[in-house]
Image (cartoon, rainbow, N blue to C red):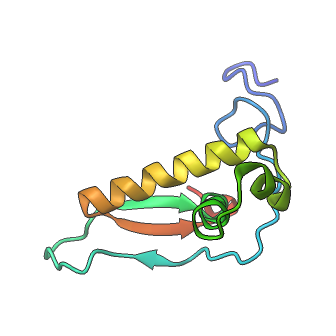
Amino acid sequence: MNEHTGQGMGRCRRGRGRPRAKRLIENPCEGRCFKPSEDTGCESESVLVLSEEIEAIRLVDLMDHDQESAAAEIGISRRTLWRDLHNGRKKIADALINGKSIEIISENNEL
């Protein structure tokens, strides 16, 4: 354990909790970016949405899976799927309401 930060080896990027579980994503779409069509003349803010969150939204909202079957398809717990779904929906709503661009990234590319 690091004396100064209290962080141990093998922890997630923020240094607390367990590492993120591997997800089985059928069609990764990282690298895509969606921007408002209105040109404001300046760079708009961005919302970073993880590919895991997009996959959860795709399965539940687009493919009409219930959370239990969607979680099984991705290979994670229902609670983890719910968290990904909730975080992804919140980020997308923020972008739509506040005119921000949406960038889809994978966990490995995250800042």
Work out which quarter of the rendered image holds the C terminus and state it.
bottom right
Which residue is at 55% across, 46% downward? Answer: 86
Query: Is 60 rendered above or below residue 11?
Result: below
Q: Position of residue 37 (x, y in %)?
A: 24, 81
Q: Nearer the viewer, residue 65 or 28?
A: 65
Would you identify the image quadrant in which residue 38 lies? bottom left
Is 43 displayed left or right of 101 in the figure? left
Up the image or down, 16 lies above or below 89; here it is: above
Task: Residue at 53% x, 54% y: name it.
Answer: 88
Q: How many numbered circles does the render carry? A: 0
Question: Residue 98: x, y in percent?
Answer: 25, 57
Residue 73 locus on image (x, y percent): 83, 61
Pick the quarter of the image with the N terminus: top right
Can you give x and y, in whole percent of width and height, for residue 84 in the image? 63, 49
97 displayed left or right of 59: left
The answer to whether residue 64 is above or below residue 69 is below
Judge by depth and name the residue closer to the eye, 85 or 104: 85
Would residue 25 be found to the left or right of residue 109 on screen? right
Q: Pick out the residue farthest to the left.
A: 41
For the residue pair 63 and 37, the one nearer the viewer reads as: 63
42 in relation to 46, above or below: below
The residue at the point 32 percent across, 62 percent down is: 96
Dividing the picture into quadrants, the one containing residue 35 is bottom left
Residue at screen point 17% across, 79% down: 39
Q: Quadrant of residue 8?
A: top right
